[in-house]
Amino acid sequence: MRPFSFVDARREQNGILAGVEARILRWMAARMPDRINSDHLTALGFLAMLAAGGAYALSREDKLFLHLVNGCLLLNWMGDSLDGTLARYRNRLRPRYGFYVDHILDTISMSILLAGLALSDYMSFGVAGLVLIVYFMLCINVYLATYTIGTFKISFGRLSPTELRLLLAVGNLVLLFQPTVRLMGGSYRLFDVGGMVAVILMTGILIATTIQNIQFLYSAERLP
């Protein structure tokens, strides 16, 4: 492959917990043993998400595995969030490598997580598939905007992956006591309802950001 000029995209993170999270991650990076590097943390985050998918599948037989899911989500947060912070703290940045590896692994791990959730029977296969499709569409939009606009949006509105992990963990705890909800006279899986709400919100974000990006790019490259 021929070399080319590369400019790292500006990161945009406006999550509710962004400020607190950044301080915690910097504190952890400063105390991380030298023998542990960003690649180790990336692997930890990936393996933790695969384990979360497996724990979801096992929770079909024993709902206590939902606690293991939450433990895996914590490890995933640590690996997925701390790898970049550690690289920046140690000035060991590989922006192209890090961006590509992080997001191709996210694609695989999210597929496994939702497959495990569907196998758990806490979410139907149809809803899990729809969540995954809309999630991938949103990711594609983010990656295209990163390339064409130069801004990498980690959060939308006030929600980032950290807040989403926290919401999922809380939902897992609720599942222990109330796996179904009643709406309009019918009984539905709690996570089917939550999944459809997520689909609606992600679709709205996708439409709004697509319009915004098209308007920006049209203005930036207006023909004479």
Image (tube, rainbow, N blue to C red):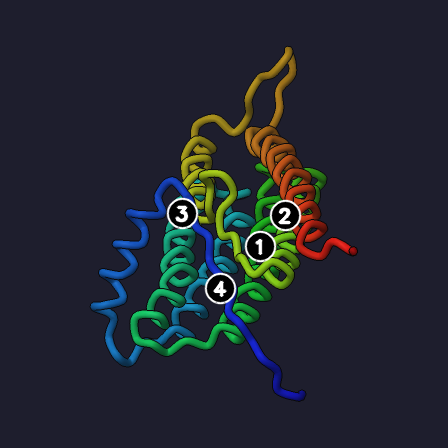
Residue 49 left/right relative to 126: left
Residue 70 left/right relative to 9: left
| Residue type of the residue flagged with mark 1 | Met
Question: Looking at the rendered structure, which numbered label has been put on residue 135?
Answer: 2
Circle 4 or circle 2, nearest the eye: 2
Q: Earlier in the sequence, mark 1 or mark 3?
A: 3
Q: Earlier in the sequence, mark 1 or mark 4?
A: 4
Q: Nearer the viewer, residue 132 or 57?
A: 132
Which residue is rendered at x = 41% and y = 36% of the image? 170
Which residue is rendered at x = 27% and y = 61% of the image? 26
Which residue is rendered at x = 44% and y = 43% of the image? 66
Mark 1 to mark 3 CA distance (whole Å) = 15 Å
Q: Are marks 4 and 2 in contact (CB under 8 Å)?
A: no
Residue 192 picture quarter? top right
Q: Are marks 2 and 1 in contact (CB under 8 Å)?
A: yes
Question: Label 4: which residue?
Answer: 46
- Dot 3, how many residues are within 10 Å of its Cα: few (below 14), some (14-19), or many (20+)? many
Mark 3 to mark 4 CA distance (whole Å) = 15 Å
Q: Earlier in the sequence, mark 4 or mark 2?
A: 4
On the image, the x and y values in percent for residue 72 come to: 41, 54
Q: Nearer the viewer, residue 180 or 135?
A: 135
Quarter of the C terminus within the rendering: bottom right
Q: Is residue 45 above or below residue 120?
A: below
Circle 2 or circle 1, nearest the eye: 2
On the image, the x and y values in percent for residue 51 come to: 48, 58
Could you say whether the residue bearing mark 4 is in a helix, strand or loop?
helix
Question: Label 1: which residue?
Answer: 110
The answer to whether residue 78 shows anywhere in this view is yes
Question: Label 3: which residue?
Answer: 70
